[in-house]
Each structure stands twice: as C-alpha cells, then as structure tokens.
Amino acid sequence: MASKKPHAFNPPSVPEPAPTYNQVCITPVVSSSKLITLAGQTGMRKDGPISSDLREQAKGAYDSIHKCLAAAGATPRDIVMVRHYIVKETGDPKQDEKDVVDRGWGELWMEYMDKEAEGHRPPDTVVPTSLLTVPPRSNTPTFIMRLLSFLCLLSSIQLFTSARDITFPPVSGYSSQQIIPQQNLGLDITHAKFAGLMTYANLPYVHCLAPEQQDVVPFDIAILGAPFDTGVTARPGARFGPSGIRQGSSRISPASAWSIYTGENVLEDWAKIVDCGDAPLTFLDNTAALKQLDKAHEIVSARPTNSSEHTTPKIVTLGGDHTTTLSALRSTHNHWGPVSVIHFDSHLDTWDPEVLGGGISHYAGVNHGTFLHIAHEEGLIRNTSIHAGIRAPMGRPKGDLRNDIRCGFEIVKAREIDRFGVAGVIARLKSRVAGTKVYISVDIDVLDPAFAPATGTAEVGGWTTRELLSILDGLEGLDVIGADVVEVAPIYDNPGETTVLAAAEVVHSLIALMVKSPS
C-alpha cells in the first residue's frame, strides 16, 4: 500500500490564535517568577520540615495548574514534564541547591502519585493540536517558552507513535517483503533480519514434517537440519551445527543475496526454497536416531514441488556429524538411483566398519568415518565418485587406499591445488562425475583450521575458504540433486564465528548449484 504524507505534525489553521498551555493554565494561576520563587522556597528548607504555609501555597499553585492542564487535554506525561522543567529553571545554579528544589517538588509529586493510585488519574488523552500553538516570544517568559516547546514536542511524539502500527516479523525474518510501508506516515522500515525464529538465510519456514493429513506449502529445495553427533570418533558438538549454520547465515536474505560475481540471486530464482527446521532425533540411541533421520528425509523428499518441471524436492542437509550423509544418500537413491559423490573432506570416510568401530555392535561401525563404505555396500553410490581436499593420515596405508578404490573413489589431495590450481581441481572433479546425478558432501574440515576451527576432527594444511568457494562455483552445470554441509561444531568457534560464516556461505553455493542444475 502506498504511503501517505504525514499530517500529525501540521495543526489545522484557525480563525483566531489558539490558546496555549501558558495562556490557559499557568498565567491565570501564578506568574512565572512567583511560580519559580514558590518552588525554590518550598525546596530550600534544608534544615527541618517545610512550613505548612509554604506547602499549602506551593500545593495550591501546583494543583491549580495540574487541574487546568488536565482539563485542557494534557496527558499525565505532559504534567510530569511541568515539574521537570520547573525544577530545571529553579533555584541557585549550584547542583546541591537544585537537588533540594527537586526534593521539595518531589514531595508534592509523591502526593500526586498517591492520587493516581487511588484512581484520580486524569484521562490519558491526546493533547488537542489547538493547544500546541506557541505565542510570540515577546509575550512569554523564556522558561515558559521552553516548557511549551517541550510539551509540544512530547505531544507530537505521542501522536506519531500512536498513529503507526508495529508489524512483527513472521516465523522467519524474510518470508514477506523486505520493506513494509507504515500506513500513512511515509515511513519504511527494513524487515528484521535478526528477529523471529532462526532459519537459514531468513528463508520461510515450512513444517515439512507435518502429518500427512495436513497441507504443506509446495517447495523445490529444502533446508533440513540433522542435529546428530554421536557417530564421531573425536570431539562432539556437531549436533549444534544446524543452529550454528543458520546463525552464520542471518545476514543473508532472499531480497539481498545478489552475487557480486554473477549478478544473480539464486534465492529468488525459479526454485521455491524453504527451511524445514530440524529432524527430531533422539540423542540417546544411534540406531533409533538414524532411523528417524531416514524417515525425515523420506517425508521431505516426497513432498510436492512448486515447479511443474520438477517432481522431487532437493534437500540440503545441515549436519550434524558426517554419519548423517548416509540417510541423505538413501533418500536420493529412492528417487534418482545411484549417484556420484563429490566428497570434500580431509579424511577418506570409506573405512571398513569392521575396523573403525566394529566388533562391539553393528551400529558402532556406522559412524562418520565409515558411512561412504556402507553407502557403497548398499548400492547407493556409483563407482564414479571422488574425494577432494584429503590430507589426514591413515592407519593402514595400503589397506585403506585399496578399500577406497573398491568403494568407487578417486582422490584429489589437498596439496595438489598448489600444482593444478583451482581450475585444475575443478576439471578433475567435473571429469570424474560427468553425465551422472551428483551428490555433494562438504565436511567443513576440508578447510584449514585457520578458516574453520569449529569442527570435531580438524587437520592442518587445508584449503582456504576462497579456494573452496571458487571450486564450488566452478562445478556449475553438474546435475546436483542433493548436498550437505557437516561437522560444524559451533562450541569450538572463535568470537568472530569464522566457521559458521564459512559454512553458511558454502550452503549458499550448494543452493546455487541446485538452482542451476539441469534437473
């Protein structure tokens, strides 16, 4: 709705000069000089009580002005300011004497407050604009002029604030337009990025996991949190990764996500992108938690799409430790069959479950270092997958590498970027997965700890944030049908939130690849 020009500050013209508070109330009761003197005498009695005659004189003058102002339409707040201005203009300039004046008037003011408590408070009405006209300076003492000016300003502010409606943000900060016209005041307020429930990039929240009988808004790309970290072999804390990544994205919004590099805004392209919140997972039983995550992916991926050209929503999972990728791969397999995986990580994550965690129980072998091995065994991934950024030491050099090859992976080691450059890494990745459906998994520890310290198993010698983002940008054109960012453990981040900021931008890049994907 178009904003109208404000009118609250322009009193209507009248045939005769409008009376002022001074003319209506103060001057008929007592001159300004007598009023000031009375206030000073009332308060200057430092030793001993205030005499009854002075109290009665002061109280009579005060009550007369108070009643007159109330009858003229002044609010209690306006009347409060009468006292403040009298105190300010009264007595000797020495601070201690002004304090005494304030004490004297304070006693009278307490009596007024007692009256309010007894129900004698005047009605809280807006001051008529006809009483806000200030008379010529020559006819009014300086003190009164200043008092009236302040009352005029105060009343104007009250009119201003009472005329505008406060619009609260929706569930997410940016599920509606960024600028909200404030009725007829011509005032636009930018939407509250940091208010409301936290969603990734202030995207609209959709209850994607609602019961089947409830209608759910169609969407094309979903953000789904997986707060799970009991599959780690080092530091826990990634269960808080989804909220941390959302926190890191709070500066982003659909209306302000235009790329300086491409001039595009993938958050406002063809795809309806929403945040589904987190999958409800138990943190006491890995077996149950992973089944719950499987079910959450199954439900979200079965929702109707907003675009008629696509039949299955794509999901970006916010981990959680890397075990959570297994559920995402099971979901993509149900809709697209086996996929090629581009796995950004400092570790291989194809270790044999019988070696890493096995022997105690079956699910002890299902963890963040074995999920790709299990995905291979379940037939979820193709033999055209590839690691990128690998640099962590191995326990069984020959056995681990042979096992990795059997799982269908090639390796781009972290230091190879120094020989091939970013362009060379991009070429190897695209060549490896060409012509297939692609799932991209980003363990934040692919970055050097200088750029992402908040992770469970940090390894030195990693890539920079700029190198990773440039590589992701270079993958445009691949048929990306799913992705995740995992192993973000905000508890280990620095005060500048380096890791969650990096993770949030990586998610943004993954969304861009999905939006530009051919299917």
Image: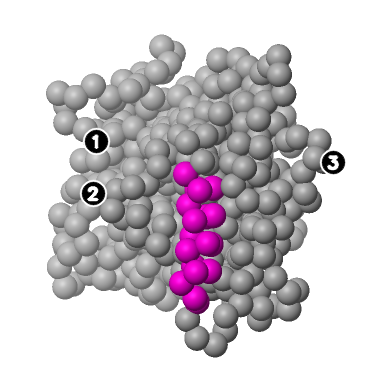
Secondary structure of the residue carrying numbered label 2? loop
Kind of residue sitting beneath label 3: Ser
User: Could you tell me which residue is drawn at 61 percent across and 64 percent down?
Assistant: 38
In space, the residues marked 2 and 3 are separated at their CA atoms by 74 Å
Q: Is residue 512 above or below residue 142?
A: above
The residue nearer to you, when weighing 163 against 35, is 35
**Res. 447 image quadrant:** bottom right
Of the numbered discs 2 and 1, the one sitting upstream in the chain is 1
Residue where numbered disc 1 is placed: 209
Q: Three-letter amino acid code at disc 2?
A: Pro
Span colored in magenta:
50-67
| Residues packed near mark 3 inside 10 Å, few (<14), some (14 to 19) or many (20 plus) | few
116 or 214, which is in the foreground? 116
Please tell me whether residue 126 is drawn above or below residue 116 in the rendered image.
above
Of labels 1 and 3, the one closer to you: 3
Question: Could you tell me how far apart the alpha carbons at marks 1 and 3 are, in whole angstroms?
Answer: 73 Å
Q: Which mark is residue 362?
A: none
Mark 2, mark 3: which one is toward the viewer?
Answer: 3
Label whose residue precedes the other's in the sequence (2 or 3): 3
Q: Residues within 10 Å of mark 2 (few under 14, many from 20)?
A: some
Residue 433 position, x and y percent, is: 52, 38
- Side of 299 where 463 appears, left or right: right
Instruction: Please name the residue that numbered disc 3 is placed on.
Output: 138
Residue 117 is one of the magenta-drawn residues: no
Q: Does dot 1 land on a helix, a strand or a loop?
A: loop
Q: Residue at x 62, y 42 (%)?
A: 28
Choose between 156 and 328: the one closer to the eye.
156
How many numbered discs sit on the rendered protein? 3
Residue 336 lies left or right of residue 363; in this view the side is right
Q: Residue 80: give x, y in percent of width and height.
A: 53, 53
The residue sitting at the right extreme is: 138
Mark on residue 280? Answer: 2
